[in-house]
Image (tube, grey):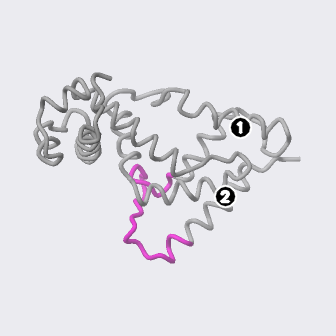
Amino acid sequence: MPGLPSTQRGAATSRRILDAAAEEFARHGIAGARIERIISTARTNKAQVYGYFGNKEGLFDAVVADCVDQSTAALPFDADDLPGWAVRLYDENLHRPNLVRLIAWIQLERRPAGRWFDSSQHEHKIAAIAQAQAAGRLRPGDPFDLLTLVIAMANAWSPTSSVYTATEADDPAEHERRRTLLHDFVARAVTSTP
């Protein structure tokens, strides 16, 4: 990445740019996003955007990395509690839906097939699942596939759902019903089979 800010003021500007760009890219994708709207929302200028992030593609990559980092920090992973992790991911999608939207744009505009992410982003999760499988606590199978299924179940009501997108405005009782159902389904799916 080009010149990351070294001052507190520069860090605040960078943060405003990342936040504004996350909203812009989540709404419009890479091709549809406009740097002019980002700089207006972030109260900055093109020189700073390009100085910190290089170009529009670099800014998009930085936004995705930032959203992944925020999500990872908010969702500590425990292979022995995949049902609980799935429920926390459901809640994360309600509170911060941009990451799911950004992933959808990556799939639409960059990588229509295969993994959308660098494998290092999930490496520790895959290794933890493999260890739990080796100890007999999780069902056998490809650890990546197991993680993929758990994420898919947690994203069933996300902005990329083909059936229903949940929001924080939904009835709290509906959220609780979905959390319970999700927890139960993931628990049954990942439990070691005799």
* Image spot of residue 121 (x, y percent): 53, 32
| Residue 59 in the image: above or below residue 92 | above
Span of residues in magenta: 155-176
Q: Which residue is mark 1?
A: 128
Q: Quadrant of residue 164?
A: bottom left
Main secondary structure of the magenta stretch: loop
Q: Quadrant of residue 30?
A: top left
Residue at (71% x, 39% y) in the render: 129
Residue at (66% x, 40% y) in the render: 146
Q: What amino acid type is highlighted by mark number 2?
A: Phe
Label 2's element? helix
Q: What amino acid type is highlighted by mark number 1?
A: Ala
Q: Characterize the local packing of mark 2: few (<14), some (14-19) or many (20 or more) Cα atoms within 10 angstroms.
A: some
Q: Nearer the viewer, residue 54 or 182?
A: 54
* Residue 25 in sight: no
**Foreground disc of the pair 2, 1:** 1
In the picture, measured across the screen, residue 155 lies left or right of residue 1, that is right
In the picture, measured across the screen, residue 142 lies left or right of residue 122, that is right
Q: CA distance from mark 2 to mark 1?
A: 20 Å
Q: Are marks 2 and 1 in contact (CB under 8 Å)?
A: no
Numbered tag placed on residue 185 in the rendering: 2
Q: Nearer the viewer, residue 151 or 77?
A: 77
* Image spot of residue 109 (x, y percent): 31, 30
* Image spot of residue 180 (x, y percent): 62, 67
Residue at (70% x, 45% y) in the render: 79
